[in-house]
Amino acid sequence: MTKVSGRLNRLAESATLAMARMSRELQAKGVNIIALSLGEPDFDTPEFIKEAAKKAIDDNFSHYTPVPGLPELRSSISAKFKRDNHLEYTPDQIVVSTGAKQSLANVCLSLLDPEDEVLLPCPYWVSYAEIIKLAEGVPVEIKSTIDSDFKITPSQLEASITSRTKMIMFSSPCNPSGTVYTQSELEAIAKMLDKYPNIYIVSDEIYEHINFTDKHYSIGTIPSMKDRTVTVNGVSKGFAMTGWRVGFIGAPLWIAKACNKIQGQVTSATCAIAQKATERAMLAEPRSTTKEMKETFLKRRNMLVSLLKDIPGIKCNIPQGAFYVFPDISSYFGKSYANEVINNANDFCMYLLNFAHVACVAGDAFGNPECIRISYAASDKKLTDAVSRIKTHLAKLT
């Protein structure tokens, strides 16, 4: 008899990966699927980064490195934090991991005891809640809506704090909504948190370089937050290096040491070649390196939002970063076509997949069950064709 652990049974499959899997299965059967479900830039890794990786191979960087990463890489990340974010982290306060997802898992496994609560402003990235559960913590959702541009207020946050609250985890720019918190908004949250000195902040800034406001602000720069903030980042999004699997944290030294200890028993260091490539990326001037990609995403955002607003019943705001739109589609709940009833966002996405042959992700997994996530990391033609299909098939619902 085969029996997996209760821990695994309590863990949900990643909604984004699940939709990608279903899309591939249909594509293997010859169905022309337009896949807008995964969060992956449709750009190639810059040549200068690839050249650094090739040189590392030629220089025989093929051995184990220190668990938290090569010293020269951590020094370059330290310099990046200071240059781009005005954050002061020494190399010893930095831990490099196999993607930002592992960085987040390291933090949760290092800080959470059973039943510790983690506040999640909605919407949040799908893996946050499951990683928290894996660490035996309790995710606590703080609801937001499209009318507030998916932002929460300090009073909303404070109302969710209990004696069990250990941590707040959020992303800005946000996956899936594209929400970007301003300096004044983060300062207001920090002022409220001054009353609760035992709560830690995990600030996921992986979409830092895809920010259409041109004003990225790190909550860790606020003096009272410095010693209780873990800043998470990586190279997957801004440098189109998703498959290289490199993420990192800057954290108070004791948290960095804890994450190093956890990682040392799980994966040890990430790939040495990828580390050398990342070192080169960290030394680059980000505005020039990411300029073309950001400008392309901005044009696509404008086009996609305009097209979606032309579909009756779809409510769409204007995301300020990342490469997603997160429209409210709840007006379609209760409608049907060919015995297919749309009761929720999951039904809506399955209807689009099976009838329109467009893959999106339901908002339930992000904490907003009235929404869906659409990635615009795709060509203009694919986006235009996808919206045309969506519009045609939504018109059939009654």
Image: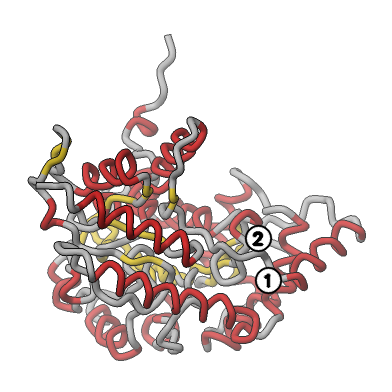
Amino acid at the residue labelled 2 = Pro
- Identified at 37% across, 77% down, the residue is 302
Q: Is residue 227 above or below residue 243?
A: below
Q: Does residue 134 appear in this view? A: yes
The residue pinned by badge 1 equals 74
Q: Is residue 144 above or below residue 391?
A: below
- Identified at 40% across, 67% down, the residue is 202
Element class at badge 1: helix
Of the pair 296 and 66, the residue shown nearer to us: 296
- Within the image, what quadrant is residue 44 found in? bottom right
Residue 353 is situated, as x and y percent measured from the top left of the image, at 33, 43
Q: Earlier in the sequence, mark 2 or mark 1?
A: 2
Of the pair 257 and 239, the residue shown nearer to us: 239
Residue 362 is situated, as x and y percent measured from the top left of the image, at 28, 50
- Identified at 42% across, 62% down, the residue is 383
Q: Is residue 142 left or right of residue 306?
A: left
Residue 377 is situated, as x and y percent measured from the top left of the image, at 48, 63
Residue 11 is situated, as x and y percent measured from the top left of the image, at 35, 38
- Within the image, what quadrant is residue 143 found in? bottom left
Q: Is residue 64 left or right of residue 215?
A: right
Q: Residues within 10 Å of mark 2 (few under 14, many from 20)?
A: many
Q: Quadrant of the N terminus?
A: top left
Q: Is residue 77 above or below residue 237?
A: below
Specify the color scheme: secondary structure
Q: Is residue 339 left or right of residue 300?
A: left
Q: Residues within 10 Å of mark 1 (few under 14, many from 20)?
A: many
The residue pinned by badge 2 equals 68
Asked whether the residues under the numbered discs 2 and 1 touch, taking CB atoms below 8 Å apart as contact, a structural biologist would say yes
- Identified at 68% across, 55% down, the residue is 67
Q: Does residue 201 appear in this view? A: no
Of the pair 149 and 157, the residue shown nearer to us: 149
